Amino acid sequence: ERLPALLAAMPKAELHIHVEGSLEPELIFQLARRNGVRLPYASVEELRRAYAFSNLQSFLDIYYAGASVLLREQDFYDMAWAYLQRAQADNVLRAEIFFDPQTHTARGVPMETVIHGLHRACQDAKQLGVDAELILCFLRHLSEEEAFDTLEQALPLRDRFIGVGLDSSELGHPPEKFARVFAKCRQQGLHLVAHAGEEGPPAYVWSALDVLKVERIDHGVQSAQDPALMKRLADEHIPLTVCPLSNLKLRVFPKLEQHNLRELLDAGLVATVNSDDPAYFGGYVNANFLETFAATGLDAQHAYRLARNSFEGSFADASAKKKYL
Ligand code: HPA
Ligand code: ZN
């Protein structure tokens, strides 16, 4: 079995990972004890049993509840450090890590506590051989005004994150809602990405590109419904950060065998494989590769292409990319 070994060993970049989604039930309970936070679950096992999702929203409700144990800078450090060690084990050389500050500032946690803890872990990751950067995500179920407030709180720490993204409940919250705040981020020289076409229609991918002017699309799997959009994504080399096990667990595809990753690759798109929220969806990035390849019959050529796409699609600077590729 050479393919699983290749998938595990090949150097890769992970471009779609929410650090709050890497919080394992064991660490949730450890932090709850440390901080005196009461959880509505009696045990790790009971919490894990609640991880049975029917769509994106049913996941988000539990994901935001899990993050309630994060209070101190060290909590954010410990969460990110645990992810970075797992990333190293999967031969991730570059990680661009999403975080959701509004989930924490809404509970009274200062912005600096969040960013300092995460950033210190990213710096320490150099010792692991992992080049790690942060991307601040706005919660799209909240208002654009709240996104502006969040940006204002984060801008004093502008040098500790490389870009901004857009996540949370997609349907009913189109990218256009955040046109002005993304324009301001663009002026700041921040990289721009957005979740689009996970549960939402191809129209949301179009507006992420045309209105928000994002450089990458997170998920984007619904683009396959729109041939003109597929041509645009291929022609402009716009990376898609695909998360197969997330799509399976949130029922975007009923079975992994029916996932359209191969269709995206065959259409010439810069598709990548990522874990999204590995503690909730049952696998870090290598599990996503292994299970998707087994289910859809992708081969070694696809593996090389996906590894290359991950570095090509990253925001690493040109000299670092040359080294990776
Ligand atoms: N989609 C939207 N919001 C999210 C996700 C996702 O896959 N993961 C964490 N927040
Ligand atoms: Zn995501």
Image (cartoon, rainbow, N blue to C red):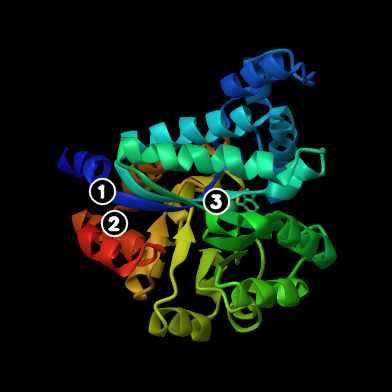
Pointer 1 with pointer 2, Cβ within 8 A: yes
Residue 88 location in percent, x, y? 34, 37
At x 74%, y 63%, the residue is 171
Residue 150 falls in image quadrant? bottom right
The answer to whether residue 153 is visible is yes
Total count of labels: 3
Q: Is residue 127 above or below residue 303?
A: above
Number of the front mark, 2 or 3: 2
Q: Find disc 2 in the rendering and name its residue.
A: 307
Which image quarter holds the C terminus?
bottom left
At x 31%, y 59%, the residue is 306
**Upstream in the sequence, badge 3 or badge 1?**
1
Number of the front mark, 3 or 1: 1
At x 81%, y 58%, the residue is 142
Task: Say which amino acid is labelled 2.
Answer: Ala
Residue 122 location in percent, x, y? 46, 42
Q: Find disc 3 in the rendering and name its residue.
A: 247
How far is disc 1 from disc 2 in space, using C-alphas? 7 Å
Q: Find disc 1 in the rendering and name its residue.
A: 11
